Image: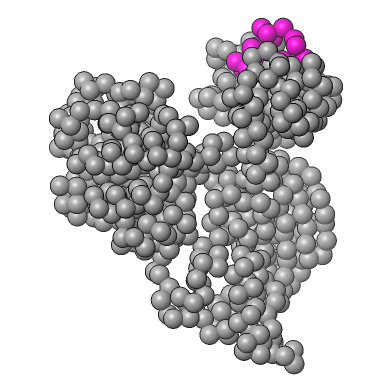
Amino acid sequence: MKVDSAKICLIFREMADFLSIKGENPFRVRAYERTAETLEHLPGDLEELHRGGRLADIPGIGKGMLEKIDTILNTGRLPAHEKLKAEIPEGVRELLFIPEIGPKTVKLLHGTAKVANISDLEQFVKSGKLRDLPGMGAKTEENILRGIRLYRTSRARILLGKALPIVEEIVAELKNKASTWIERISPAGSLRRGKETIGDIDILVSSANSHPIMDAFVQLSPVEEVLAKGETKSSILTRQGLQMDLRVVLPDSFGAALQYFTGSKPHNINLRERAIKRGLKINEYGVFTQSGEKLGGKEEEEVYNLLDLPLIPPELREDRGEVEVAEAGKLPKLLENPEIKGDLHVHTQASDGTASIEDLIEKAKEKGYEYIAICDHSSSLRIGGGLSEKMLLAQIREIRNINCHLTDFQLLAGSEVDIKKDGSLDYPDDILKQLDIVVAALHTGFKQDEKTITDRVVKALQNPFVRIFAHPTGRLLGEREPYAIDLDKVLEVAKDKGIWLEINAQPQRLDLTDVWVMEAKKRGVKLAINTDAHNLQGLDLMTFGVVTARRGWLESSDVINTVPLEDLLKNLR
Ligand SMILES: [Zn+2]
Ligand SMILES: [Zn+2]
């Protein structure tokens, strides 16, 4: 059986947590933590390294741990882990999912205060009893309550960036195993609309024979549990904890079903009302007359056309005026991936990235780019490995040198310059002016009030060298709420100063959000879609930024990094 390394890391992490909750020897706890850390950063495939006997050479994995890895690889389980897991009630284990709470706090809460689950915890904090425990105060109370809120909103949903690869894997395997029977296959639901987080996943297949497809579906390798198996619909739970529903429909209903199950609900209600006004009925099987005659449903486009509309792209189906705009023939020509010509916010090993400049160039060229901007962190950002002035000047020289040898591609010397507490920038102007592009960003002081944060940003954006304001709200989905910032005001200043706002393509950020992207476009503010890549694969995240841009109705002319190099340089001068 194939056990993926993420699962093994999870087992070791949980072992550390569970032992710590039980108050076991801290050295034992630490041994599991170290092993998990090491496994998370292996120079290759875990299973291959193990089979080749090379795992023993890697520091941080002791002999006892090697045996445990062997057991998990061979059986998919670790008995000691299952035993501990059974000893600690599920509600107590769940406390670990609250961002502010570690195993030591769980031990304290459970052992001393008899808190047995998240609801208990919430009551306990609200009753003011938490602050009587050692090391707890008003600040902790606030943080824990916020953590509970975040956990509750994120639990049922998974990031688009996590869901998409899982779905692609499943679709590919299903296509492979049931190719004879599958006519067409497509994801539907919020995934197809490109929402930033996804609940359950819907996959739609058209076929005249559902049995062999359902048989194959419930036996796919990512299946952890089969929740239901039926003729037209089956549901599974993947080993990543994601529920996935497969529906098989007849080919002449595929378009109608795809439309119906893609949603959104408000968009579909809008369409249904349109149908009624035209004396028609619309459902997942097709479009019908009142007397029940079927007018269409094989293609999604037919459904829209029968309602006197052009096909509306899935990303727009949020009931934000798309039906009216479609009716008027004014749908935007949405941005497409190949229109992106470069990436204006990329990190290297010089700060907290792992890729070399050379590797980044090669990968960017493969993607058909004409330019990337190297934007490592600035000096005061210690945790981000910020560059001192001297290091930055050396990097600028290095970039100019490399550019001498490049044809049809150019590196831009840039920096992700920290906006300091007083709104000043982290390098003096005589350094900034030597850069091709300055990306300003907030990384500290997230708890300041709205006026303080907005004033800081507004002051920074007045600096004549700043061109991009990165990840404007600082949110991390499921982990950190946006800081308090008056985006209205920021847009006003951005428009005035010709600043480009970033759509940060990291799946956990997607910042700006679709709704604010729409607003920026309305105000005539241009966007830059950047990956903020910290490794080579990071450059591939661009697609999530493009999806967000599409959900914000952007066309290529709204996005600065769709222009060719020459025009970009003109813009930067
Ligand atoms: Zn940043
Ligand atoms: Zn960055």
**Residue closest to the eye, 547 or 514:** 514
The colour scheme applied to this rendered structure is one colour
**Identity of the residue drawn at 58% across and 49% down:** 197
Residue 104: x percent and y percent?
69, 16
Q: Quadrant of residue 121?
A: top right
**Residue closest to the eye, 93 or 525:** 525
Above or below: residue 493 compared with residue 99: below
Q: Is residue 197 magenta?
A: no
**Identity of the residue drawn at 55% across and 60% down:** 193
Answer yes or no: is residue 549 visible: no
Q: Is residue 28 magenta?
A: yes
Residue 305: x percent and y percent?
54, 83
Left or right: 151 as drawn, with respect to 440: right
Above or below: residue 216 compared with residue 314: above
Above or below: residue 285 compared with residue 464: below
Q: Quadrant of the N terminus?
A: top right
**Residue closest to the eye, 141 or 543:** 141
Left or right: 162 as drawn, with respect to 540: right
Above or below: residue 13 compared with residue 404: above
Q: Quadrant of residue 434?
A: top left
The region drawn magenta spans: 16-35
Secondary structure mostly seen in magenta is: helix
Answer yes or no: is residue 433 visible: yes
The single residue placed furthest to the bottom in the displayed view is 291
Left or right: 369 as drawn, with respect to 428: right
**Identity of the residue drawn at 52% across and 75% down:** 323
Q: Quadrant of residue 292?
A: bottom right
Left or right: 49 as drawn, with respect to 240: left
Residue 189: x percent and y percent?
63, 60
Residue 264: x percent and y percent?
61, 65
**Identity of the residue drawn at 42% across and 80% down:** 329
